[in-house]
Amino acid sequence: MIVERLKYLIWAADMDRAVNFYAKVFGGQVLKQNEVISEVAIATGIIGIHGGGEGKRTWTGLSFQVPDVLEGAAEIVAAGGQLTREPQPENGEPPHLAMCVDPEGNEIMLTRKR
């Protein structure tokens, strides 16, 4: 089998808001955007965003490794997202995890390399 591309699909009730969130917060490159399906490249991955979402809270399994979880969490909140678990220091080290929700209700994680 020849795999041409691998992407992870999430849902959005408001396509423009979702694309702008992932492009702005994670420095994503918009590869494709329309009302039905959009694609945003982040690091070496692609997030597909499908229109027609209901805005319900949904766990995605998406994890974004960032250098500073506190700064990343602040950027998510500033861009309209939420934190469901605030970053907490562990064993005297800076926080390594934040549980977040994008403006469309998709639950995501921020992690720091340990």
Image (cartoon, rainbow, N blue to C red):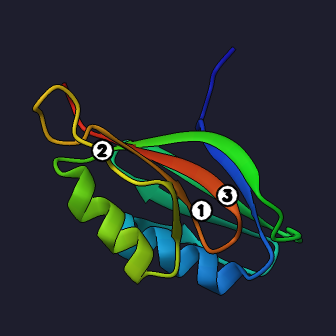
Image location of residue 111, percent across then percent down: 33, 39
In the shown orientation, is residue 75 left or right of residue 77? left
Q: In the image, which disc is placed on residue 85?
A: none
Q: Secondary structure at mark 3?
A: strand
Query: Of the residues under marks 3 and 1, which one precedes in the sequence?
Result: 1
- Residue contact between numbered discs 1 and 2, judged by CB atoms under 8 Å: no
| Disc 1: which residue | 39
Q: Amino acid at mark 1?
A: Glu
Q: In the image, which disc is placed on residue 106?
A: 3
Q: Can I make out residue 27 in this image?
A: no
Q: In the image, which disc is placed on residue 88?
A: 2
Q: How packed is label 3: few (under 14 Cα within 10 Å), some, or many (20 or more)?
A: many
Q: Nearer the viewer, mark 3 or mark 1?
A: 3
Q: Amino acid at mark 2?
A: Gln
Q: Secondary structure at mark 1?
A: strand
Q: Is residue 22 above or below residue 57?
A: below
The answer to which of 110 and 12 lies nearer the viewer is 110
Q: Secondary structure at mark 2?
A: loop
Q: Residue at x 58, y 66 (%)?
A: 102
Q: Nearer the viewer, mark 3 or mark 2?
A: 2
Q: Residue furthest front?
A: 91
How many numbered discs sit on the rendered protein? 3
Q: Can I make out residue 58 in this image?
A: yes
The answer to which of 104 and 29 lies nearer the viewer is 104
Q: Residue at x 10, y 31 (%)?
A: 92
Q: Is residue 76 above or below residue 46?
A: below
Image location of residue 57, percent across then percent down: 77, 58
In the shown orientation, is residue 49 left or right of residue 29? right
